[in-house]
Amino acid sequence: MSVKSKAWYESVPLLFPGICIAGGIVMGYYLSVPVRYVFVATLIFLAASVLTCRFNRLQSVFVALSCILTGWLLWEIQHNSELSTLSGKRVTMDVVIVSEPSEREKTIVMDVLTAKSGEKLRLTLLKDDRSRTLLLGDGLQINGDIDSMPSTSNYSGKIFAGSRYWSRKTVPLDGLHRTDRVRLYFLQLRHKVLARLRSTIIDDDEYAILAALTLGDKSTISKAQRERYSIAGMSHLLALSGLHLGIIYMFLSLLFHNRRYQVLNELLIVCSIWVFVLMVGMTSSVLRAAIMITIYSFVTLLNRSKSPLNTLLLTALIIIIASPSALFDIGFQLSFTAVLSILLFVPLWSPKGKIWRIIWSPTIVSIAAQAGTAPLVAYYFGRFSVWFLLANYVAIPLTTILLYSMLCMLLFSWWPMVQSLVAFIPSTLASWLNSWTSWIAGLPLSSIDQLHPSKLQVALIYVILGCIYYLLSYFKKHHYTRTAYA
């Protein structure tokens, strides 16, 4: 008697709850309903899910509706901010700078937290001699009009203050949440490391790349430099992601490799990873990678089977439950689709022979990641990079070596003589990376611009990609079946 094989979705139990919760967040975005109504409806359907436990199909319907309403409720709770009542009003408030001030043509832009409520605002100041001296962690008193921002952003509003409407002020941090105070401490620590790096690296373009690749500070990257990386299809290198965190994880694993203290080693590695995440500002791509590494380490210690797809879905659920607006964040969408595409498509190609695997693996990973993110990149940025595969063949190995050299440089930061010698390596590698990017961006037909697909067209492209994946997995499965019986 043959054993019936499980359907593919049964091996991914978090898929349908995740889709339902994400669907509820989308419904909350388009349909604004008072929180109390959504809360009552959620309780009713949760109770119905329990009472219908003997009727599997009916219970499944109620569970799905409960997950949808849960996502809707999370969205309404997050965006029921008291600060929104101040929109359009002129206010005077004390704030703390929590990001590196970024210079624009005529203004300086930064993120601030209100000292009393801890709300996050986008602050814009006119560029002058005073505003150029502002640093992360400085306190300000500002007077201006608070304007609303899209509900999908992580900001409660934005405010512009002219030169006469702001002043420095010592702001007590007691009103901030403890989490915000911890994040501010690590961001100030990053600022000190960046200052030391700036004193070592002289060239502006080299420093900008090293600061972005290692500590996530993109405030010094020029517009022209950012454009070159975008045309070459290498913008993902400027945003810290799973690639960077994976390299750091491997580096730490080499340092803590004693099997006798496996639990302690994994704990030290995970704690180090999260310290790094706090230092780089807890961006969505880094958060996703850090949570996946944490889950991976936990499962490793329990000697349980590891399912990368389940780990990715659990990570996405944790992020959107903690912050529903992350679902609409461009970084989260690009990061999630890139990893999902790699996890789905890469296992479909497994060439025989070690040499072929070394050659083929980076190729298929780059193609899979590009296929997963290309529709979103075209929708948001209107661009498709033609030479992305050629660019990544050199850029990814170069970035890996660069990150290892930067970690060594930071380890020897206490020894000035050695630091100057070690700093030469990442500086040279950053120069090579910039030169390679400029060469790729200058090739004929380096990018196709003015692509603006609609949301429906993007959805249809992903449906086509899903069909391609189904066909490829179907042919692979039947090919192996025929081979086994041959």
Image (cartoon, rainbow, N blue to C red):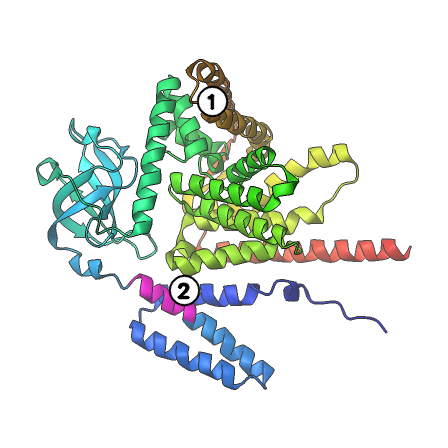
Closer mark to the observer between disc 1 and disc 2:
1
Q: Which mark, by number, is residue 78?
A: none
In what element is the residue under mark 2? Answer: helix
Residue 327 percent coordinates (x, y): 42, 56
Which mark, by number, is residue 412? 1
- Give the mark nearer the N terminus: 1 vs 2: 2
Residue at 39%, 18% in the rendered image: 200
Disc 1 to disc 2, C-alpha distance: 47 Å
Which residue carries the number 2 mark? 25
Q: Position of residue 477 (x, y in %)?
A: 77, 57
21 left or right of 351 in image: left
Q: Against 343, is 76 above or below?
A: below
Would you say residue 473 is visible in this rendering? yes
Chain part drawn in magenta: 70-79
Q: Quadrant of the C terminus?
A: bottom right
Q: Residue at x 16, y 57 (%)?
A: 86
Mark 1, residues whose alpha carbon is within 10 Å: few (<14), some, or many (≥20)?
A: some
Quadrant showing the N terminus: bottom right
- Secondary-structure class at tag 1: loop
- Give the amino acid at mark 1: Phe
What amino acid is found at the position of numbered circle 2 in the picture?
Ile
Q: Residue 211 sits in which quadrant?
A: top left
From the top left corner, tell me how far across and down residue 34 is, in percent: 29, 73
Q: Extreme front residue here?
A: 260
Q: Main secondary structure of the magenta part?
A: helix
